[in-house]
Image (cartoon, rainbow, N blue to C red):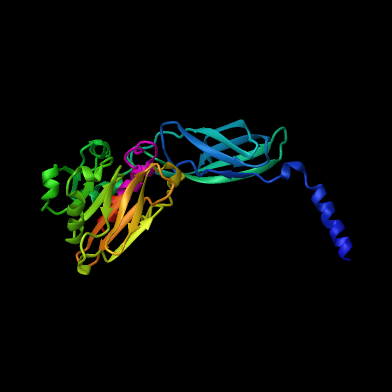
Amino acid sequence: MKVVHWKILLLFVVLIPSHALALTISNDNSWSALFGGKAAQYEISLLGLANSQVSIHWELSVKGRVLSRGQGRAGLDRDGLGVVQLTLAAPKLTPSAVVSGQLSVVVFEKDNTDPIAQKKIALNIYGQDVLWAERQALGTRQIQLFDPSQATAKAFKSLQLPYNLISKSQLLNVATPGLIVIGTGLALNDVRGLTSVLLELARNGQKVVILKPVSGVFPLYDSSDFTRFPTAMSLSDHLPLPQLRGLTWPELNSTLTYRLNPSYSDSEAEVEVIPETQTGWSWLQLDYAGSGGRLIVCTVPLIERIDESPVPQIVLARLLANASL
């Protein structure tokens, strides 16, 4: 009986058509949302049979209505890898609108009409005013922005986010309530005493966010007094933000040019910002339960990529909101 079973199995394997060979479709390198009213490049990665040729058919739709479609060919390399760029177009929406779309991708082996792989991808489409719902709440945060490069202030102004630009002296002697934001691109150690001031602010109940510093060493604590230690410390290699509406950052680790690397000894613990490294973390959070203070360091390039997709704008808004919880 065992011999008969093996013969049946072998016959079944032989009869599997060649176009049934496995192929996988990935969208890990692309945003999960796009703007209506302008074309967007969307990257699809394929993994299948080495040195093979495939054709791709795709369409973007909302509630069954096709907004754009296309087709093309791709060659997989000797490792079975291939990349296809799709040009997606969606109609212009009212500024505050958001609709749920679907991108359908079907892959065929060359000159064969039977699909070898297909994937349906949820893809939200936004009007130009992505943050209309968050803007009023963020207005109550009383954002105090220290921004020597002016890049963050420019982005805030474009997004119509309310903020108050403060000087170095105002930052080092800040006494007003609100959310302290350190703009992107700052070398932390270039501002003498900055990290100590920011730690003290957080210990005393202030909310502090540092956006993508380019260098510097940040102590996790700067005192041997245990009562001054944060009550919770966390390092993360992703975006640990609540209520991100299912939005993801494409291939986060491959897009980071700066990472946080911790070091510890018997007397101290610190985090250093290191450029062009494959190891480390993208997120540091210190919480002080007694005072309600919080400090966040985020090395994700939010400001630098703010206009590429609605995703960086939403992540930025959620980051500012999360810091103030």
| Residue 242 visible in rendering | no
Read off the magenta span.
301-318
Most foreground residue, 256 or 273: 273
Tell me: 247 left or right of 61: left
The quarter holding residue 250 reads top left
Quadrant in which residue 215 is drawn: top left
Instruction: Using the image, determine if residue 7 lies above or below residue 103.
Output: below
Looking at the rendering, which quadrant does residue 305 occupy?
Answer: top left
Location of residue 36 in the rendering, given as x and y in whole percent from the top left corner: 41, 36
Q: Is residue 26 visible?
A: yes
Q: Quadrant of the C terminus?
A: bottom left
Residue 167 spot, x, y in % from top left: 13, 42
Where in the figure is residue 155, as x and y percent of width and height?
27, 38
Residue that appears at 35% across and 36% down:
307
Identify the residue at horizontal 80%, vertical 51% (top origin): 13
Q: Is residue 69 magenta?
A: no
Q: Residue at horizontal 72%, vertical 35%?
A: 112
Image: 180 above or below 36: below
In the picture, measured across the screen, residue 110 lies left or right of residue 1, that is left
Q: Which residue, as the protein is rendered here, is positioned at the far front? A: 266
Q: Position of residue 87 (x, y in %)?
A: 50, 32
Which sits in the foreground, 128 or 190? Answer: 190
Give the left or right position of residue 115, taking residue 134 as reference. Answer: right
Where is the N terminus found, in terms of image quarters?
A: bottom right
Nearer to us in this view, 312 or 94: 312
In the image, 192 versus 98, the foreground residue is 192
Q: Count numbered badges in the picture.
A: 0
